[in-house]
Amino acid sequence: MKPKVEHNTIVQPFSVGWDPNDGIMDDPDNHIERFLSKIKGMFLDVDAADAYLTEQGDVKVYEVYEKTIPQRDGEIQFCSSITHPGQIGGEYFMTKGHFHARRDTAEIYYCLRGRGYMMMELESGEYVMEEMYPGRTVYVPAFYAHRSINVGDEALISLAVYPGDAGHDYGSIETAGFKHLVVEKNGKPDVIVNPRFGKVE
Ligand code: S6P
Ligand code: ZN
């Protein structure tokens, strides 16, 4: 059977309001919210995550607002990505991170608020980290897994733009993790090698 192709579905032109101060989109089709209780396993110190949950309750680590765009070549996906401030065992709040399902697709992040880093890693574990702050644009090349890390004390807000058919592969990160993690050391961000890289379950 032939795969269902959506090329006969034409997207109508549209615009959407989006507040750069809080990253909230006026009329999103999706609002993804990631709470600590659901993603605590991505932090190195899961005991510290449990202690945080007991002492401070469940908190939102990050969220995404987006419109639904057909996942096909030629379209462009865009979203508002908001990573909240905080730390678990010295490790900064961050997104889960992913490879694109179609690996040969890039992405740009235009930062509007906050302070952080984009961690970009190849499957081999080679990495590059770029700073994120208002007015800065990060280019995430094809083949790099990417994750936003908030090292500031307010929300890290960016507009992310990527190809329509890029898709998300979270599984590779869930099973292997990122090789490089960012933790606070002497009051400053510091990169450490993840002792669980390749062993995360
Ligand atoms: C999508 C893009 C962002 C992230 C968002 C949340 O390709 O990179 O919109 O989806 O920052 O991160 P994650 O890793 O949970 O998708
Ligand atoms: Zn992406």
Image (cartoon, helix red, strand yellow):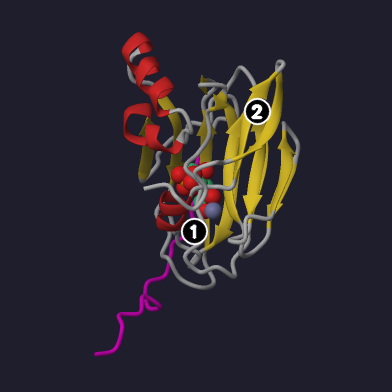
Q: Which residues are magenta?
A: 1-17
Q: Is 144 in front, or is 115?
A: 144
Coordinates of residue 16 in the picture (x, y in percent): 50, 43
What is the three-letter code of the residue carrying label 1? Answer: Pro
Disc nearest the viewer among 2 and 1: 2
Q: Residue at x 43, y 64 (%)?
A: 11
Res. 15 in view: no
Q: Residue at x 40, y 41 (%)?
A: 28
Coordinates of residue 71 in the picture (x, y in percent): 43, 66
Indicate left or right for 121 with 198 as reference: right
Q: Is 19 in front, or is 146?
A: 146
Q: Is 85 in front, or is 31?
A: 85
Residue that mark 2 sits on: 113
Q: Which circle's residue, 2 or 1, is located before the other in the chain?
A: 1
Q: Residues within 10 Å of mark 1 (few under 14, many from 20)?
A: few
The answer to which quarter of the image holds residue 185 is: top right
Q: Residues within 10 Å of mark 2 (few under 14, many from 20)?
A: many
Q: Residue at x 71, y 53 (%)?
A: 139
Main secondary structure found in the magenta portion: loop
| Mark 1 Cβ and ligand 1 under 8 Å apart | no
What is the three-letter code of the residue carrying label 2? Answer: Arg
Where is 47 relative to 1, above or below? above
The answer to which quarter of the image holds residue 51 is: top left
Q: Which mark is residue 13?
A: 1
